[in-house]
Image (tube, rainbow, N blue to C red):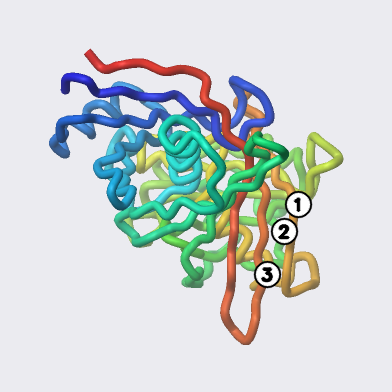
Amino acid sequence: MKNCKFYIVDVFAERKYEGNQLAVFICQESLTDSEMQRIAKEMNYSETTFITSFENYTVRIFTPETELPFAGHPTLGTAFVIQQEFIKGKVKTIPLNLKIGQIPVLFKYKGDYVSEIWMEQKEPTFHGFFAPDLIAEVLNLKENDIDKRFRIQEVSTGVPTIITPLKSLNALKRAKINTDKYYDLIENTKAKSILIFCPETYDKNNDLNVRFFADFYGVPEDPATGSGNGCLAAYLVKQDYFNKRNIDIRVEQGYEIGRPSLLLLRAEEKEGKYYVSVGGKAIIVAKGELV
């Protein structure tokens, strides 16, 4: 693992030491799957990425427990490192080749500064519904905390997620995973993660507050999740949450665990097809070399 450089990036962060942390590794000699998995466990961030080829920007994504076909903040953060540290100039798009397929990452600028990074996600798929009392038990909440105007549904733009609407910020803050109930639930579902959201926010400029739980992947709570929020964006349009077929909103996440994050979501439905984009900012906070 000689000459294996890495970068630490805060993604969906307005300032340093906010948002979701990511480690991006670039190695001149190849790593085995088990070596990448061990490094990801050692880093212990929600995800760690490995750029395995610069010819076509091939990227692999690992949580502390497993490899993922796709994840949002690793996609944006890795593309940001490539643009800042290797291209070192303005570029409109960097297409990353992930296990799920190619995901284009788009860059917006203010002068020479990257102001926003966006990714177009795969077209969402919508799956089964869940009873409010069942999910309330998993979250250690009361059934009345669930906003029953909208159904709890499994949605995927690459990583299936159970999207759960809550009534209030108070309910969202009280949520706590019941481990036994959680593992009973995911034993029979493709989705291993749960995203909860409510219309009350800490920052009045934002539209929704979100929390995301994925114990199965070794991530008890994620401070910012692009894949989960992509699923949420599709869900909001599908369920007519804002009473319109397109959205352009600001979502806050991570406040409850001291890593405030801001995600920008866009989604629309046209002739039965759904289009989803997730955006935000990224900041490189450290560089190093694996010894």
Label 2, on which residue? 147
Q: Is residue 24 left or right of residue 4?
A: right
Q: Residue 167 carries which label?
A: 1
Which label lies toward us, 2 or 3?
A: 3
Q: How far apart are marks 1 and 3 (CA)?
A: 18 Å
Badge 3 amino acid: Val
Identity of the residue drawn at 41% across and 18% down: 287
Which label lies toward us, 1 or 3?
A: 3
Identity of the residue drawn at 33% across and 53% down: 98
Q: Which of 12 and 213 is in front in this view?
A: 12
Badge 2 amino acid: Asp
Quarter-wise, where is residue 35 in the image? top left
Q: Check disc 1 and report its element: helix, strand or loop.
A: loop
Label 3, on which residue? 237
Q: In this view, does 35 lie to the left or right of 130?
A: left
Q: Distance between the residues labelled 2 and 3?
A: 16 Å
Quarter-wise, where is residue 114 in the image? top right
